[in-house]
Image: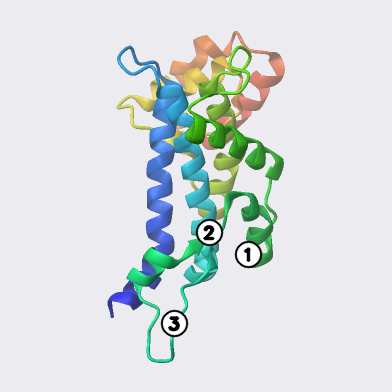
Amino acid sequence: MDNIMFFDTIAYDMLSLGLGALSHANYHAGYNNDINDKWAELSVIQAAHAAELLVKARIAKEHPLLIFSNLPSISNQDTLSIDKLAEEGRTIEWAELPKVFKAITNCNFENADVFRTFGRLRNSVQHFGIIPNRTTTSASLETLRFIYSFIDPFIKEHWGLYAIDFDEDIDSYEHLPITLIGYEIEFLVSPEAAEFAAYWEEELVNCSKEYQFIMRKRIRDAL
């Protein structure tokens, strides 16, 4: 019974954890901290973790075992237990996810190039602790661009969710959108976020006309 419950809930659990990582990434990329100067680098790892979990969660909706590239070997007398999967199973690697996702779900993997490029940035931070081209690349900005060009449309398409709704700041709707608007990062506006659009106006009026047009339309459509 325990194994059955596990396989029934694994996609939901992966989705929940992915959204938790997304909240962490938004918080660390969208705000400054005077105590820990590695928030930007951490946001890269968290956003990549979120994306990987969310893509795999969508694959797991088809069947949980499809997220594995290699399953443990079992004899005729054995069963495929949760413990055996955790210890010996190998899930799909980052670079293979776009191809596997499309084959299993029959859905297009939008912005695959963005996904692959951010994966290389994640590898640099995770394995070497450095940001390539640090003088020209802001880790926080790259994280936010990735979240709102890849994760945001992905979770909207597959679960009807908005990345702007996942942030650990208490007054998130008053603060995070202003950061995004300052960078002219387009984001999907949830109905909950749109209620706070008045807080964004001062920053929005300083943006390009094209960006203002896009975001004002999204705000109107969400209300």
Q: CA distance from mark 3 to mark 2?
A: 27 Å
Q: Earlier in the sequence, mark 1 or mark 2?
A: 2
Secondary structure state at the residue bearing disc 1: helix
Q: Which mark is residue 58?
A: 2
Q: Quadrant of residue 21?
A: top left
- x%, y% of residue 129? 48, 27
Q: Earlier in the sequence, mark 1 or mark 3?
A: 3
Q: Which mark is residue 74?
A: 3
- Quadrant of the snapshot with the N terminus: bottom left
Task: Give the residue drawn at x 47%, y 44%.
Answer: 50
Mark 1 closeness class: few <14, some 14–19, many ≥20 residues within 10 Å:
some
Q: Which mark is residue 219?
A: none
- x%, y% of residue 167? 39, 33
Give amino acid for label 1.
Thr
Q: Quadrant of residue 209?
A: top right
Q: CA distance from mark 1 to mark 2?
A: 8 Å
Q: Earlier in the sequence, mark 3 or mark 2?
A: 2
Q: Are marks 1 and 3 in contact (CB under 8 Å)?
A: no
Give amino acid for label 3.
Ile
In front of the other: 176 or 217? 176
Secondary structure state at the residue bearing disc 2: helix
Task: Give the residue drawn at x 55%, y 40%.
Answer: 152
Q: Is residue 100 visible?
A: yes
Give amino acid for label 2.
Arg
Mark 2 closeness class: few <14, some 14–19, many ≥20 residues within 10 Å:
many
Q: CA distance from mark 1 to mark 3?
A: 27 Å
- x%, y% of residue 67? 52, 64
Secondary structure state at the residue bearing disc 3: loop
In front of the other: 192 or 33? 33
Q: Is residue 196 visible?
A: no
Task: Give the residue drawn at x 49%, y 62%.
Answer: 90
Q: Which mark is residue 105?
A: 1
